Image (cartoon, grey):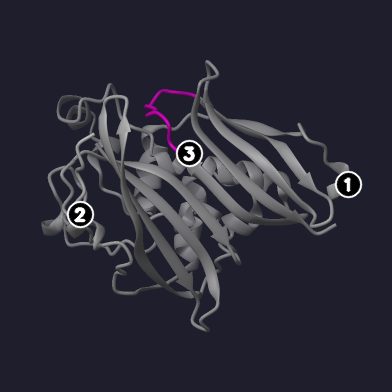
Amino acid sequence: MKIADLQVGHGLPEREHTPSNVSLFLYNAAVWNAHRIHYDERYTTEVERHPGIVIDGPLQGDWLAQCVSNWLGDHGVLERFQYSNRRATYLGDTLVSGGRVTAIDADSKRATIELWVKSIDGEITSPGSATVRLYA
Amino acid sequence: MTQLLTDEHRAWIGRADEPVEVEVHRSDIVKYAIATEQVQKKYLSGDEAPLMFIFNLFGRPQPIANLRPDGLPRGMRRGPSLPLKRVMAGGTEVAIHRPIRPGDKLTGVSTIVDIYEKAGRQGPLIFTVRELCVTDDSGSPVFTETQTSIAR
């Protein structure tokens, strides 16, 4: 992939994510996070009043970073990355990560990417953006 | 709008925490890569850390006795005692200088770079912006993370 091959509007491959109790347990163990809203359903619904086990916001940030990294491969480097969690998502939800190129600077070989995690209904739950620099 | 922040709160702007040192282990990268369902070999083999491996990398593990009933550590971060208590994550922005690899010995310094308030639709909001600057053992920058937390 070269900067000359890209066009504004170019889409990054979308990917579906459906976290399970097991995958959330492994993620929270890996990042050393013992917050009970990610594994204790009774506590989560009765004390913190969520409708279900909460999917970690930074995990959705990871999906956005993967979206760029998997698309970019060894053709360049990720220089800047930004995301925020706009609304909570819950165990049982299927979410879709994706993105598109919004700006290209051919001289510096940089491209700006808009990123999103969406619900299956199309509502953006975690928007983000990235800047990549291609090698060619 | 009533001013919630005082000079005492704003005096925290510019204050840095003590540096935290972390050594990166291949097995930790592999566990993270599996848990996040990475697909690239360099991550699954632990040769390189996925970008978001940095989340909580500089959080010091606390004894179980230091955890609150919700499972989070007491006194997670130094900072002013704000008049609004429900805290949620705002945005995260990362400037990446180089990938993290096993064997890296990293030093992170977190600094409060801004505290400000705004009127939200459902009441006042206080924004605290922290910058985490991470260098390797040669002093070269690895990444800089800017995190905003919102109290309401």
Question: Disc 1 residue type?
Answer: Ala
- Does the segment drawn in magenta span residue B103? no
Of helix, strand and loop, which one carries label 3? helix
Q: Residue at x 87, y 43 (%)?
A: A5
Residue picked out by circle 2: B73
Image quarter of residue B152: top left
Q: Residue under mark 2: which chain is it in?
A: B
Task: Pinpoint residue B19: horizontal percent, then vertical percent.
Answer: 34, 74
Of helix, strand and loop, which one carries label 2? loop
Q: Residue furthest right?
A: A4
Q: Residue under mark 3: which chain is it in?
A: A
Residue A4 disc label: 1
Residue A60 disc label: 3
Query: Do the residues marked 3 and 2 share a common chain?
Result: no
Q: Which residues are magenta?
A: A84-94
Q: Do we see residue A41 in this rendering?
A: yes
* Quadrant in which the C terminus of chain A is drawn: bottom right
